[in-house]
Image (tube, rainbow, N blue to C red):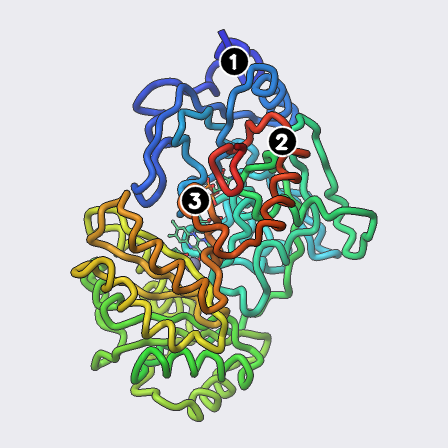
Amino acid sequence: MLLRAFSDVVGRVHVLTETDVVASYAVDWTGRYRGETAAVLRPGSVEEVAAVVALCREHGVPVVPQGGNTGMVGGGVPLHGELVVSLRRLSRVGPVDAAAGQLTAGAGVTLADVQAAAREAGWAYGVDLGGRDSATIGGNVATNAGGLRVLRYGDTRAQLLGVQAVLGTGDVVEHLGGLVKDNTGYALHSLLCGSEGTLGLVTAVRLRLVPPAPARVAAILGMKDAASAVAAAQELRRTLPTLSAAELMLRAGVELVCSVSGAPPPLAAPSDAYLLVEASGTADPTPELSAAVASLAGVEDAAVAEDPQRIAALFRYREGHTEAVNSLGAPPHKLDVTLPNSVLAEMVERLPSVVEAVAPGASVWLFGHVGDGNVHVNVTGVEPDDERVDDAVFRAVAEVGGSISAEHGVGTAKRRWLELNRSAAELRAFASIKHALDPDGIMNPHVLVGSG
Ligand code: FAD
Ligand code: MLT
Ligand code: ZN
């Protein structure tokens, strides 16, 4: 009965109910989170999204918004039988305002297409991440995605000037004018950014663009150990103004990527740790990078790339970690944490033993955006629902002032640990906001603060 009402709104062809078709929307990218749903709705306009939300409110139907389904924390899949609302059909790019250096995009536009549109307009987009071809800009906003260039341009929230969204109340809010200075009240776009679909569905976004930095150089530095790699990243942030990425890899992870992808080792002899660095600007940054690297301690060897293909090949050693770790069989536990810079080196060395203490024999794959303090602790060899490793790592991180979610979000995966980072007063404020914008508790009710 209700499916017919949804069909009347989005069209029969956009109400997916066939088991095989629906299945791919019900399992996350890692395979760790698997649910089920009666239907996936694919609205094609903000009006259709609003009509869907109105029906869901009226009938008390809980909703999981979904973009590219590349999220890592089980927040975009229907783990409790929710209806999935896929925003992928909202895939219109534009208008692009080349004079302002801004663009508007539908929530379903992929990050890669946003980047391409920015390029075509003579600009660049400041956020980049490995899931770019599938992840949507709506998903990026919902998770406040970070990625490879946060140290240079900031996270997704830093690019966001406004949104159009359908709130859990059913109201459509729109503020897409792109005024850079606009102190006319609460920044709803900033609030929705990182809200993981718990307050409403983002349907369009207004983004600031950055000047292109076409002169690029990248290098993989073989480092004596992880602590030297961390110290080098910290030093380069000060000595290399054109630094645009600083990514940590360890020997085991690089060897895994090579064995899965067939790529040759990045350097003639292996190092225990690697730092992938990129400098970019309008003038050739190679001399500046070479001088800065020459004064670093602990560098054993380096591979430098200046042409786009070689640079991409160096980045594949780092970006290849996600797929390589996922190819090992049972889904990994993906623990995405930020550490204060003062303890970053020490914690990068200590975290494997934190895992070992609760899961002897498990494998730890450590990599990440070390230039902004973000480390990805991936653990394999542990059952998907055995959360002892997650618990031990999150507690160790929180104890030293770190965050249990750097960039992936809280989702369903980290809800039970949120109080490690957030006070009772903050959680009460979260609950009040949730209740105000989603009074029926239908928007992603098992994610982040939850509807309970
Ligand atoms: P989904 O996975 O579909 O959803 C994610 C969350 O957002 C869910 O809670 C969902 O309900 C909500 N949501 C999605 N769309 C909307 C919407 N329009 N309105 C309201 N809520 C919505 N992330 C990083 O931050 N940095 C990285 O470096 C990074 N690298 C990655 C590399 C790979 C290979 C992969 C597979 C993933 C990577 N990710 C990374 C994770 C992922 O790409 C991001 O979290 C991304 O922002 C998710 O976008 P999505 O469209 O796939 O969202
Ligand atoms: C990355 O930096 O590669 C992503 O955040 C994905 C991952 O954690 O595997
Ligand atoms: Zn990441």
Mark 2, other Cα within 10 Å: few <14 / some 14–19 / many ≥20: many
- Amino acid type shown at disc 2: Asp
Residue 280 rendering spot, x and y as whole percentages? 53, 74
Identify the residue at the far right of this view: 184
- On screen, residue 389 versus residue 200, left or right, reads left
The CA span between labels 3 and 2 is 28 Å
The numbered mark at residue 438 is: 2
Name the residue rendered at 35%, 26% in the picture.
Answer: 36
Mark 1, other Cα within 10 Å: few <14 / some 14–19 / many ≥20: some
Name the residue rendered at 19%, 48% in the picture.
Answer: 329
Residue 31 rendering spot, x and y as whole percentages? 30, 41
Q: How many marks?
A: 3
Disc 1 element: helix
In the depicted structure, whether residue 283 falls above or below residue 298: above
- Amino acid type shown at disc 1: Ser
- Name the foreground residue: 411 vs 267: 411
The numbered mark at residue 134 is: 3
Identify the residue at the far front of this view: 424
- Name the foreground residue: 96 vs 60: 60
The numbered mark at residue 7 is: 1
Question: Which mark is first along the chain, 1 or 2?
Answer: 1
Quarter of the rendered image showing ligand 2:
bottom left
- Amino acid type shown at disc 3: Ser
Disc 3 element: loop
The answer to whether the residues at label 3 and label 2 have Cβ atoms under 8 Å apart is no
Residue 413 rendering spot, x and y as whole percentages? 40, 45
Q: Is mark 2 within 8 Å of ligand 1?
A: no
The CA span between labels 2 and 1 is 24 Å
